Amino acid sequence: MPIPKAELHLHIEGTLEPELAFALAARNHVELPYADTEELRKAYLFEDLQSFLDLYYSLMAVLRTEADFEELADAYLTRAAAQGVRHAEIFFDPQAHIARGVPIGTVIEGLSRALERSEERHGVSTRLIMCFLRDQSAESAMETLEAARPHLHRIIGVGLDSAEVGHPPAKFKEVYEAAAALGLRLVAHAGEEGPPAYITEALDVLRVERVDHGLRCMEDPALVERLVRERVPLTLCPLSNVRLRAIDMLEDHPLARMLDAGLMCTVNSDDPAYFGGYVDDTFHAVHEALGIGQEQLRTLARNSFEAAFLDRDAADEEL
Ligand code: ADE
Ligand code: ZN
């Protein structure tokens, strides 16, 4: 039985398995530049974040209708339930869809159809977090927030993802202020490929409540001390870090050292269709590679509920 856990760092577009990609391509008459699922899987050898993002965005071409987004989310929730996930806070990238002519309403309403049934069907409670693409302009992010206004009851918060280096958090100060004024919760990717200073900036300028990845905090002892003191949750994704070459091998991952330092770590799957495992697979992998024992695995699971955007009573029920 997998440990009950919350998943807090999961891009729904990153759960698009090759089989579903081909099925949707056929349904929507989209031609993929791969002969079959096997050939597509062979393309999953990434040099860095950007080489992954290129494939990730191009494969989104198959997602066109509400039914496509519903099917994508339902497939993820089925897998998540089998991995012991009881609560999932799910990222989506509206700008990547709007750019292809898919309206934001199609994305949000399609995903929501699956999410609404999730507790009953899969025993998984859910929230949606809308991410801004940091390699696009701040104006585009603000327009996206505006476009989401009719659907805000479906969204718990905003995040920041895509190519990190050269796109520091401060670029999005205004849109984060606007999101906070709308009552949205705030998270951002920082310190995945970008420097520790981006983590500080996400906290001080964007006022995020959780840091997605935060891996490179380990290069700055004063920052580690602050993150421990302020109990800032980090949504780590160890299999992603290996596949995107932030680290060479899982055996080199700092997760064990981060836990020993007292950091509020959680373990998540990021883009599991691309990175070789869902969240419980990741728990097993860090157990095997890093000797993270049962007690620490339980700590990681407990942290995931504590760091979730659940009300206190719901989180305590899971703990
Ligand atoms: N979008 C999807 N996965 C991502 C990641 N690991 N980092 C930044 N943006 C992403
Ligand atoms: Zn991510």
Image (spheres, rainbow, N blue to C red):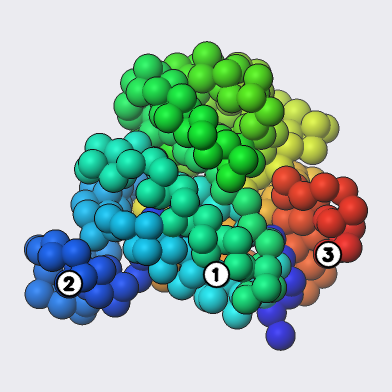
Residue 234: percent from the left, percent from the top? Answer: 65, 44
**Residue visible at 87% across and 48% down?**
312
- Quadrant where the image shows the N terminus: bottom right
In front of the other: 223 or 182? 182
293 left or right of 157?
Answer: right
Q: What residue sits right under mark 3 in the picture?
A: 318
Of pointers 3 and 1, the one earlier in the residue sequence: 1
The image position of residue 103, as x and y in percent, is 33, 41
Q: Secondary structure at mark 3?
A: helix
For the point 28% across and 45% down, the residue is 102
Query: Given the image, on which type of amino acid does mark 2 rest?
Result: Ala
Q: Earlier in the sequence, mark 2 or mark 1?
A: 2
Viewer-side residue, 68 vs 275:
68
Residue behind mark 2: 26
Q: Amino acid at mark 1?
A: Leu
Q: Most extreme residue toward the top, as rendered?
A: 174
Q: Which residue: 51% across, 48% down? A: 91
Which tag, 3 or 2, sits closer to the chain's start? 2
